[in-house]
Amino acid sequence: MDLKTKMAFGSSMKSRKEDRAMMFLKTVDVKLKSVRLDKYYSESSYVSRFDKDTAVYIIPKSDTINGSQKWKDTMREFVTDAYQYLK
């Protein structure tokens, strides 16, 4: 909010490119074996979008463990042996 003019501006943490990419994946007949998500996409909501058969590799940006079971399993794998996970 601009305090001088009292005008508010909106923003979103969600990218339109991200939405289009996920919609595109649903339209093609391709099964993902694995996906790697950088720090901007290392959140539970992104991990939960992929099938349980898709391996999701992330570099977490925080130490949170809130989220789906797949997110918790991914975080556990990262914390248990970060070197092997990143390798």
Image: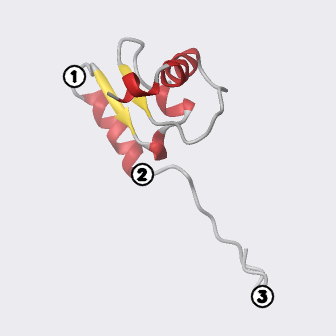
- Which residue occupies 78% across, 82% down? 3
**Secondary structure type for disc 3:** loop
Q: Mark 3 to mark 1: distance in Å?
A: 52 Å
**Secondary structure type for disc 2:** helix
Q: Mark 2 to mark 1: distance in Å?
A: 22 Å
Disc 2 crowd, CA 10 A, few/some/many (<14, 14-19, 20+): few
Q: Is residue 20 above or below residue 81?
A: below
Q: Is residue 10 left or right of residue 39?
A: right
Near-viewer residue (35 or 82) = 82
Residue position for label 1: 30
Mark 1: amino acid: Val
State if disc 1 and disc 3 touch (CB < 8 Å): no
Q: Looking at the image, is mark 2 or mark 1 earlier in the sequence?
A: 2
Residue position for label 2: 16
Disc 3 crowd, CA 10 A, few/some/many (<14, 14-19, 20+): few
Mark 3: amino acid: Lys
Residue position for label 3: 4
For the rendered model, the colour scheme is: secondary structure
Residue 20: x, y in percent?
Answer: 35, 44
Q: Is residue 56 above or below residue 5?
A: above
